Amino acid sequence: MHPAIGLYKPKSYYETLFNNFISNLKDSLTEKQFRIRLKTIIDELHCGHTEVTYSKAFNKAIKPMKLNFLPYYLVAVDNKLYSVMAVNPKRIVLLSKVQKC
């Protein structure tokens, strides 16, 4: 289900949220800093299909780096953390059931 205005919170809540976000952008930010701030706002939409991703230039810059990522996709629900799937660089494998951490 995709979010609709007024489904989770009233339209005025989202207008205030985004207006405050925009008005607080006074300094120049790195792409990473901007993405982190934007991600906190986008999470308020409660839509699993909406994501803030890296730019092509950022992806290209970090590709040769050896970064250690957690090999699981985690979701927080009701103050509990769940592992939804294992992430493999060559393929994504869905777990047979959600495992409680």
Image: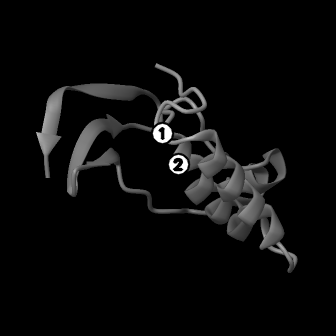
At x 65%, y 47%, the residue is 12
Q: Residue furthest bottom?
A: 27
- Residue 43 badge: 2
Q: Residue furthest top?
A: 1
- Residue 63 badge: none
Q: Which residue is mark 1?
A: 46
Position of 1 with respect to 40 (left or right) is left
Q: Amino acid at mark 2?
A: Asp
Q: Are marks 1 and 2 in contact (CB under 8 Å)?
A: yes
Task: Check the image and report above or below for 43 versus 40.
Answer: above
Q: Secondary structure at mark 2?
A: helix
Quarter of image, res 98? top left
At x 69%, y 57%, the residue is 16
Q: Label 1: few (<14), some or many (≥20) within 10 Å?
A: some
Question: Which is nearer the eye, 44 or 11?
Answer: 11
Q: Amino acid at mark 1?
A: His
Pinpoint residue 63: horizontal percent, then vertical percent: 67, 53
Pinpoint residue 83: horizontal percent, then vertical percent: 24, 43
At x 40%, y 28%, the residue is 92
Quarter of image, res 31? bottom right
Pinpoint residue 74: horizontal percent, then vertical percent: 32, 47
Pinpoint residue 15: horizontal percent, then vertical percent: 71, 49
Quarter of image, res 20? bottom right
Position of 40 with respect to 86 (left or right) is right
Q: Secondary structure at mark 1?
A: loop
